[in-house]
Amino acid sequence: NKPLLRSDYRPLDFKILTTELDFNFDENLANPFTVTSKLHFQRLTSGVTSFTLDGQDLELLSLKVNGTDWQDYQLEDLPGEGKFQNLTIDISKLDNQDDFVVEIVNTLEVANNKLLSGIYKAGEHICSQCESKGFRLITFYFDRPDNLSVFTVKITADKTKYPYLLSNGNFVEGSELDNGKHFAVWHDPFPKPSYLFALVAGEFDVLEDHFITKSGRKVDLKIFAEVGRGEQLHFAMSSLKRSMKWDEDRFGLEYDLDLFMIVAVSFFNMGAMENKGLNIFNESALIGSKDTATDARLKRIDKVVAHEYFHNWTGDRVTCRDWFQLTLKEGLTVFRDQEFTSDTFDRTLERIESVEIMQNYQFDEDSGPTSHPIRPEKVLSQDNFYTVTVYDKGSEVIRMIHTLIGEENFQKGMKLYFERHDGQAVTCDDFVAAMADASGYNLDKFKLWYSQSGTPNLKVEQQFEAERGVLTLTFTQVNNPTNDQKEKQPLVLPLRTLFLDQEGSPVVNLKTTSGEKVEELIVLESDKLVLEVVTAKPLVVVTNLDFSAPIKVEQDRSFAELALVASKAPNEYARYQAVQDLNYQVYLKTLADASFVESQEFALFLDVYKDLLDQAVVNPAVYAILLRFTSPANVAARFKADLDPLAVLEVYKTVSQALAKAHGDRALALFKQLPEVGAYEFNVTQAGLRDLKAVLLTLATKEGQHKDLVASLYEKADNFTDRINALRINLANNLGLDSLEQDFFKRYADEVLVLDAYQSVRATFANSLAEVKELTKLHSYDAQNPNRVRAIMTPFAMHNFAVMYNKDASGIKYVVEEVLRTDKFNPQLSSNLVNLLLKFFKLTAEYRNLILNELSFLQSQTLSNNVKEKVDSALE
Ligand code: DPP
Ligand code: ZN
């Protein structure tokens, strides 16, 4: 159980040029079955006469080299958790050691494989998941991303139970056999690492369509889902076609095979997987229509379909040299999916949503026990590094490069990256080099973002001297030590900055005292920058606009100034930022002194909401976000220490009550004035209006009045979003509209994903732990299915402060029980659940001790590497 280090990377001495796999599935899968693999090796380092293949839980039945039974091998079980194996093959007796074929027959376990890694059963389907190290559960291999091989796959299985037999690439041949079985052969011409291998067998509904690429090639598109749910694939198909078009238009990237398939499966740890030509999805990220998915989930489907499709170039054609480089493909592909969503829907909205992921999740990770740079240095379990840091902060790092060099240079950089590295497994350094070389921009200093963890704090100080007519601005960055790294250096921070006058109008063409133009993008390259701006009047300075750098900004600003920006700034993002800062101030001040809600400043705060409610609704989606008083969970994310969740919850209740009291009528009036949304369409205006209606109704019905409007929102709904919003408001405001739930269950009894959404609302508003546990009795619940478990545990632990942080620790203990239970069969799932406990470092001493005690208890149990790694870091 030793951690791997990035610095340990060694290139392979051999490569596997071609891989032929032959699977023959038994109908009932009761027994482990055999796979035959034929591997064509080429030696890369002369003189080396042995190599080691990775395996896990496999039984080796036979080994041949060049067709002859081969005895010169050693199979050893590695110490520690899991049955990891090394198969070392000695070829010193071989005549031609540079080029030879190894044939391996081994068994693997499918029916009892609960890891959801390797090949496993998802309900009635057989499917695979190999990223990052799942292929070794199938056969012995160089299960690492830098071995690129051309795969040919033969699958044989019962024809009735498994009418579809799928793998990567192109279909070559297939036919019936006389024993009730049939077979199919697939060939993928693009060399790929083992983590991109995929296999699917089963009965499905299929939605078919096609796409004509910009060079005129026809690509067949097929999306598969469980029988009976094919009707819910149309949205995903439209996402796929738009993604293909967008990648051509914006990045010039065209699809490269004649067939692209996506399959939805019911048991899956991740969101989805970008296997070459055969993406496999968690059904929650693929199946959905207006009647079964919220606008938010449809948007997620759109994003995930795009994300996995975009991996075809950024991930599959050019992949990672080793797993420490994961952000090379993930950060870049998240950046690409964010740009796709921005171009498709609304840029400001997308920006706000991405920023909220950073602020509400990534910042805590970066200052907590598991903090790591986007390119980690040390890993015990690779599964643990599919994090918001690697993904979302990784994307922010790409975005900063984009901001510094501009779109045109960025696209030149992408072109150069593909020219240099198509068909290769490369590093983050290779990517940055392509960007620097194509743009001529020196990124040497910038590269520290890849190796330094933690969130920089930017202090912004301003001083206005009326006599001199000068505003002195001082930017100072402070990089605090993190759990993984004590020494820090200043990072390059691109700061998009906006200057406003005292009425909230922009001031442009400013000059410094030395006559230089004040740029809209200020780049801080060291720990301090002082700027003397010539101005006769004081200015309002809004910096890090659009979250141009992933940092925390500390700026002393008056309530009045924040209120001005919040209600008047001519920039939606600036207003959003000001509203958030204002809300945070209200929390802090009320926590410090409960009588704050009687103060002048609080009246000013209420006036901001009055102003907002009196304004014309231009962009309903962003407007709805502005009007939503920050939730306890999101405000908790801004705390650095001494967070008392129950006290925060009390403030939330008090202030939202005060807002309702002051503006409930105004909210109601606006609700009634909103334009009719009309027959359902998925677009940003409609989705924004639906969201806005829910925000306004929540405010208007806070004190139990106007229930009929909530009932009618439900009854008149032609979509799932309005229905679940009505249920949510009913529970949030205790309206007692029981008949809505009765209808809901009649309507959706068979829709597991809808019921997950329902469970999440219930878990958020449950009044006791007993109520939370009661949710596991719902007919759709399955204690082994990650979607079912997470639908309850995540909202409960993240959003239900009252029950999760009950002082008797029962909420915390429930999370621990679930970690231990799931760790026995699915360490990726249990490791996800442990994250729910890792905010202890910022809580008050009382909670910190409660959680640390529980983590010590966990540490005394037998744990997977995945959970152990996190618990050990927490207790370090
Ligand atoms: N399938 C996961 C993703 O696309 C891991 N590659 O992010
Ligand atoms: Zn990805």
Image (cartoon, rainbow, N blue to C red):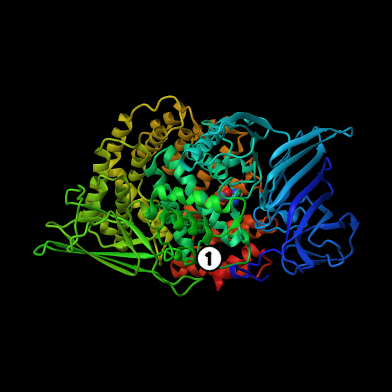
Quadrant of residue 460 within the rendered picture: bottom left
Residue topped by disc 1: 370
Q: What element carries label 1?
A: loop
Q: In this view, does 196 lie above or below 216?
A: below
- Seen from the viewer's position, the closer of residues 230 and 334 is 334
Relative image position of residue 252 (x, y in whole percent): 50, 41
Can you name the residue that lies furthest to the top here?
679
Tag 1: Cα neighbours inside 10 Å, few (<14), some, or many (≥20)? many
**Identity, as a three-letter code, of the amino acid under mark 1:** Thr
- Residue drawn at 72 percent across, 68 percent down: 80
575 above or below 376? above
Residue at the image position 80 percent from the left and 32 percent from the top:
160
Left/right placement of residue 516 relative to residue 43 reads: left
Residue 599 visible in the picture:
no
Task: In the rendered view, tell whether residue 527 sits above or below residue 563.
Answer: below
Q: Where is residue 458 in the image (x, y as percent from the top left)?
A: 33, 64
Q: Residue at x 62, y 43 (%)?
A: 281
How many numbered discs, if any?
1
Task: Residue 173: give x, y in percent of width and height.
Answer: 78, 35
